[in-house]
Amino acid sequence: MSNESGAKVAFGCTTALVSVILGSILNGWVLSVLWAWFVMHQFHVAPIGVVQAMGIAMTARMFLPSSSTKTEEKSLSEALANLVGTTVLGPLMVLGTAWILKAFL
């Protein structure tokens, strides 16, 4: 493996690790906000923190099918873009949609 390809792999691994960590925190934060907007008042339950929401999201994810059922080969940049889009942009899109729905309550 050349130095250039080794650097690309190291960059890819670092980016993936940071994306997963930030995505988990962001996902927990979004879930805690959604909980406060839609669940707390409807069911008269206590608010949840980001760490609790992260645990709930991780537990729920164990029972959901994986979206990585395709076996096609992707380049490193495509795989990283897919990972960042799923872990970071996905929760933000959910939050934006929920914010719009909240306006109708």
Image (tube, rainbow, N blue to C red):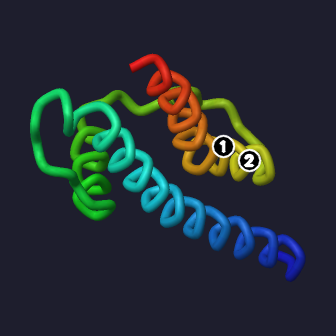
- Vertically, is 54 above or below 8? above
Position of 58 with respect to 18 (left or right) is: left
Residue 32 numbered mark, or none: none
Foreground mark, 2 or 1, reads 1
> Residue at 41% of width from left, 33% of height from top?
66
Q: Amino acid at mark 2?
A: Ala
Mark 2 vs 1: CB contact within 8 A: yes
Q: Residue furthest bottom?
A: 3
- The image position of residue 62, as x and y in percent, is 26, 41
Q: Amino acid at mark 1?
A: Gly
- The image position of residue 90, as x and y in percent, is 57, 39
Position of 94 with respect to 45 (left or right) is: right
> Residue at 38% of width from left, 47% of height from top?
33
- The image position of residue 104, as x and y in percent, is 46, 17
Residue 85 numbered mark, or none: 1
Residue hosting label 2 = 81
> Residue at 33% of width from left, 50% of height from top?
32
